[in-house]
Image (cartoon, helix red, strand yellow):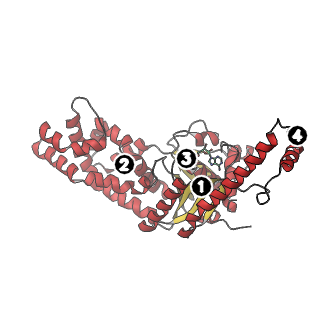
Amino acid sequence: MRESPLAKLTLERRVLVTVGAGGVGKTTTAAALSVAAARRGRRVLCLTIDPARRLAESLGIAEMSADAVEIPRARFEAAGVPMEGSLTAMMLDTKRTFDELVVKHSSTPQKAQQLLDNKLYKYVSTSLAGTQEYMAMEKLVAVKDDPRYDLVVLDTPPTANALDFLDAPERLTDALDSATMKWFIEAFESSGKLSLNVIARSAAAVLRGIGKITGGGFLEAMAEFLSELNDLFGGFKERAARVQRTLRSPEVAFVLVTSPSPPSLKEAQYFAERLEQHGMPKGSFIVNRLHVTPPFAETGVTQRQAEDGLAARDVSLEDGGAERCVQAHGDLVRLAALDAQNLRVLDAHGTPIVRVAELDTDVRDIALLAAVGEILMEGGV
Ligand SMILES: Nc1ncnc2c1ncn2[C@@H]1O[C@H](COP(=O)(O)OP(=O)(O)O)[C@@H](O)[C@H]1O
Ligand SMILES: [Mg+2]
């Protein structure tokens, strides 16, 4: 049997992070690798960001929450998946992670409460660009050393651009560190009370970034908020540096998921390059939903073969049906060839590539997740 790079990573690393463009199969892959590792005896925590709750549904749990939920062994057994280890699922909750950080890093409980009660805090902690990505990594650092787990698989947010994820810690601290922010805080602290005109003029850049919020007292709230956030500033910066360090550790591997489409491949490649630049460990590419070469690809299918093949399956055709089957077969041969051609761009990266075929169904239950897991462990198609 071929040795799959993913089998090795799944059994040896402590942290796997699935990254890639939206919709390519990050959540599915994270869950499938988790199931495969758990079957083989590892105690796995799958940390997911899945607003559609598809993963919760496929694992058969009614509600996935920010608390860890261990999937009962009986559920795997009922799906024909014997389980040697264990699988715990946890949904990432951005606001809750941010709240926990605020409490942890504020100098006093009163200061923490003041910040949590701030009108703008809720907005920033959930909607500011980069916070979701940053909090995902924050959570990773928090659970990475948890002795209850051997492997943590981190699914990443459905960001339009996967790079947002890598850059999030820096972007967030840069935003807090920006000259405008500093000025804003100083102006507020030295004047004691706000001069709205001056603040309004200078804060335009900040406000543009934060979005349009209207309503009375906004600027006062904003300044108060920034001043309180400043109280945490040292803490955040240190944390961001720690997140970055964790991501460079050899215990971690990034799994770059992509579809065979050129835009998605381009993003995966770009991500691979960025990982190299950052000195972060690339584990493997997964090319998911690949069109695979059908039988008779070299010779082409004759109308006769199509008719016979369908008759053998008791399928009767309406007029012209066999011809359409031949056409569909030809299309699939061409699509498979096109995918294979497009994939060549990944060869130059020197990172292993695991291919997964497009299945004829959604991956929507434990048995299917386990099946995809085995495909990944065996090295793909
Ligand atoms: N190999 C595959 N064949 C068929 N459907 C797949 C495959 N991989 C993933 N899917 C389906 O694609 C959809 C998107 O997958 P998902 O893992 O949620 O993507 P992402 O997390 O990257 O946004 C899901 O409905 C999933 O069941
Ligand atoms: Mg997802």
Is the CB of the residue bearing disc 3 within 8 angstroms of ligand 1?
yes
Q: Position of residue 6 (x, y in %)?
A: 62, 62
Q: Earlier in the sequence, mark 4 or mark 3?
A: 3
Which residue is labeled 1 in the image? 260
Q: Position of residue 49 (x, y in %)?
A: 51, 45
Which residue is labeled 2 in the image? 101
Q: Which mark is residue 23?
A: 3
Amino acid type, label 3: Gly
Q: Position of residue 134 (x, y in %)?
A: 40, 51
Q: Is residue 253 visible?
A: yes
Q: CA distance from mark 2 to mark 4?
A: 62 Å
Q: Earlier in the sequence, mark 1 or mark 4?
A: 1
Q: CA distance from mark 3 to mark 2?
A: 30 Å
Amino acid type, label 2: Leu
Q: Earlier in the sequence, mark 2 or mark 1?
A: 2
Amino acid type, label 4: Asp
